Amino acid sequence: MLLTIDQAVEFLRSGEVVVFPTETVYGLGAVASNLLAVENVYKIKNRPRDNPLICHFYDIKQIRKYAKIPELTKFLMKKFCPGPISFLLDITTDSPLLPATCGLPTMVARIPSHPLTLELLRKIDLPLVGPSANTSGKFSGTDVEMIQQDLGNKIAGILDGGKCQIGMESTIIDARDNNTIKIFRQGIIGKPELAKAVQKTKFRHVQILDNSSTQTKMVIPGSKYKHYAPITPIIWVKSFIELEQYKHGQTVIFGGSLSDLEKIKSIHNTIYLGERIAEIAKNFYRCLFDLDQKKVTQGLLFIPILDNSSISLSLMDKINKIVQLEN
Ligand code: TXA
Ligand code: MG
């Protein structure tokens, strides 16, 4: 059922679970301080009970009611929020958000930029949990049709915000010590964007670490679980030469130039991601969904334009997780 903002507020206040849009992916929303509602989110997602839930807020002031915001974190929040970035923060021991954090003294907080959800958050004036709206292990929902098929009969309703603009989950960072920014999960904001933000400020000397900094192995609870997988097994093809080794008539998820698309189309069945990297990221989960609808035994994935940009790194992170599962 599609909901108005007022209906969504009403359902959430009465402890129901409502899906809301964000610029990254849709979130499975419930009032973070309501233990029963939070329990229901775990049930609906079939999510392991030791994997804490990200919390959504409408502004920095609201976050401050629930957590400490160190200086560097505050600086980055002011730069990037509302936006596709989430922050690991320390909460108080008697915090009302403990149902959402699995009893941890920390939470991951985010201010999403979708206008409908910002309005929803303002109206309800309570933090909302919002893990990605998908069954645990699967790819995230980025439009209403995907969510209806995956979770439709388990939720009170959906606030329809159209197709998610970014299509990849937010970057998660920990900047609590004011000297380092640890990137736990790569989204479209990465090392270069963070470095640029601190450049020429008093934070210019901070160290930015991500999972490519080999000496650090940074894990968040969620990273130990299976992620992003379609039902159909996927083979990641890295070059045209490799693609040529497959017999004709494969199903190929392709991202790149229209002229290359035409070439591939003349041999295989294609699911087109788009021409540019932002568009490819935006359509990525939807194309995995489309692949599953085709009920083929295997899909090939080919994106020759992947580079070192933060969007590409975020995409490759997801692809690696999908492909690892198959090997
Ligand atoms: O873009 C996003 O972040 C989306 C939208 C809906 O906001 N949400 C999302 O939620 O991706 P989820 O649950 O799929 O991913 C959040 C990650 C999980 O891997 C979880 O383990 C981690 O954040 N996390 C949440 N709370 C944490 C905490 N207190 N400490 C460490 N990791 C935490
Ligand atoms: Mg998720």
Image (cartoon, grey):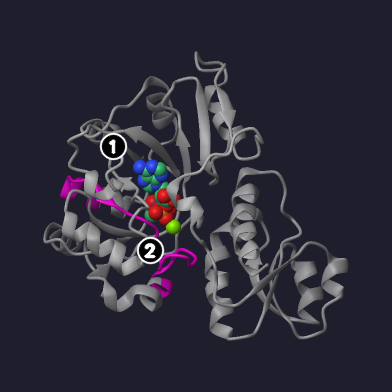
Residue type for callout 1: Asp
* Point 37% across, 60% down: residue: 48
Q: Which residue is mark 2?
A: 133
Side of 90 where 9 appears, left or right: left
Q: Judge: label 2 CB < 8 Å from ligand 1.
A: yes
Q: Quadrant of ligand 2?
A: bottom left
Question: Which SS class for mark 2?
Answer: loop
Q: Residues within 10 Å of mark 1 (few under 14, many from 20)?
A: some
- Residue 201 is situated, as x and y percent measured from the top left of the image, at 51, 16
Mark 1 or mark 2, whichever is nearer to me: 2
Range covered by the magenta-colored residues? 120-146
Residue type for callout 2: Ala
Q: Is residue 288 above or below residue 71?
A: below
Q: Is residue 145 magenta?
A: yes
- Residue 136 is situated, as x and y percent measured from the top left of the image, at 42, 65
Question: Which SS class for mark 1?
Answer: loop
- Residue 120 is situated, as x and y percent measured from the top left of the image, at 23, 53
Q: Residues within 10 Å of mark 2 (few under 14, many from 20)?
A: many
Residue 325 makes an appearance in the image: yes
Residue 275 or 35: which is nearer the viewer?
35
